Amino acid sequence: MFRCFAKSALFTCALIFIFLNFAFIRQPLITLHHFRFWEIAGALLLIFIGLFLFLLKKVTKEGAQTTNRIIALIFSCLILVNGVMAAPTIYRKVTFTRSDIEIINVSDDIRAQDMPNIYLFIFDEFSSIRAANRYYDYDNRELHDFFTRNNINYSESSNNRSPYTELIVADILNLREVANVGMTHSELMEYIRNPHIYNLVHSYGYKINTVNFGGFLGEEQSTYRFSDAAYYAIDDDAYYTIDDDVRALILNHTALYPITESLLFTLNNLRSIEEISFDNLTAQRNQRERDIVMAQFRYCGTSYRISDSNLFTIAYFRFPHARFIFNEHGRPTADEDDDDWKNKNMYLGQYIYCTSLIIDTVEAIIKNDPNSIIFLLSDHSARYLLHMQDRYNQPKNWLWAEEVYYLTSSLNAVYYQGNQLNIEGLSGVNTVIRVFNDLFGLTLSYVDQSFFAPCERFADD
């Protein structure tokens, strides 16, 4: 069109810049006045026409070449600076390996002893009794009475250090403070999938039995395992997907975002075409997750059949964490409501049903393996306030300094062969340390229970 490469390159740069940053241009315009997408697109089209005419009539070839050189220099510098800043993180992600794995030497006589089976169950986002009271006006008396009736030691004032799963589980599975907020996801997962607790129990003659969800736990040292891969492959690596990252970083910021959203909406409403029905795919996914959750509980409740001693069963349940796929009676919920935090009944129903499944499972284990040790832990309570602010843009009308005691409060209970054990006020990891010190005659130190600082968007002013 220009018959000049330099002018064409300059015009293309302008088009690409606006296309890739459409969301940043659109947002302030929507804030000032609720412009529609086509109104903004029309205005940009007129600007492009004006720019085209300006380049065609007013800009010389030499001026265009000079401008292109300046743009190339600026973006080269940005790429260089960002590359240098990102290099340490990329290098850590690629090369990170555990350098602190301990080799534990235990005599053959000790290894040959019959030791009680240990069950370590971690329930993602299972609220403490006080958090359920505060956010859902629900008194989980059923769980409290179950603990009392079965000589299960429990703490009513337990808190973990953070309302984020990987940070808490990494500490629990390594029996010490290994996590910090500056660690990458891959670093934390290395501690979770290759934890110290595996080496410790193995050194005392235990065989490891893992009950996994989404590949969250490491299985390399397991003799026995339940894997959800038998049902379907969850591709979200426990918390987020590559697809989500690509969509967030690329599509959501470009001029394509409104078009792709409209296309997805159109496809979603073509209900007669089953192959591309998103509702159908959601229904299939949710039913598979129901199957997995129920299979996990069944497997845990019958793991005593594997061995009557020296079996360490570790289970991670992403439950009652969303998706909300069960109501309080164990019946399927509506698929369109599976991530609805506004409706408190969605989380509460799943929480109540999870309580009944925990009770049934633990009762079966105690009945058939009364000499066992059973840990019942959660990482944090329902993060209702955080979800309302993040997902629904609800104003932050609460104080972190007050709510952190509820957000990080956790399920913390242990059946210790029917014996009494004072764990009041201990965090989840310190309860495990308390029991292991007593069981194995160790002197492991307690983990600091002070809270991590909140991320900026949740911090108090």
Image (cartoon, helix red, strand yellow):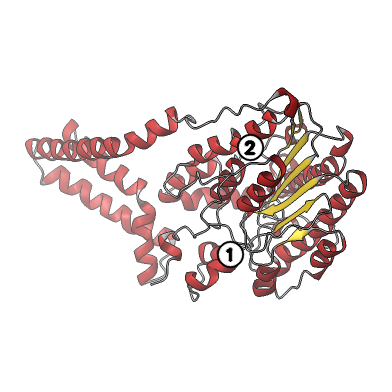
Mark 1 neighbour density, 10 Å: few (under 14) some (14–19) many (20 or more): many
Q: Position of residue 366 (x, y in %)?
A: 88, 49
For the residue pair 276 and 303, the one nearer the viewer reads as 303
Q: Residue at x 49, y 46 (%)?
A: 179
Residue 444, above or below 308: below
What residue is disc 1 on? 407
Q: Position of residue 17 (x, y in %)?
A: 30, 45
Disc number placed over residue 7 in the picture, else none: none
* 387 or 286, nearer to the observer: 387
The quadrant of the picture occupied by the N terminus is: top left
The residue positioned farthest toward the top in the image shown: 108
Q: Position of residue 223 (x, y in %)?
A: 75, 26
Q: Are the residues flagged by discs 1 and 2 in contact, CB closer than 8 Å?
A: no
Q: Residue at x 52, y 48 (%)?
A: 260
Q: Which residue is mark 2?
A: 197
Mark 1 to mark 2: distance in Å? 26 Å
Which of the 4 quarters of the picture holds residue 212? Answer: top right
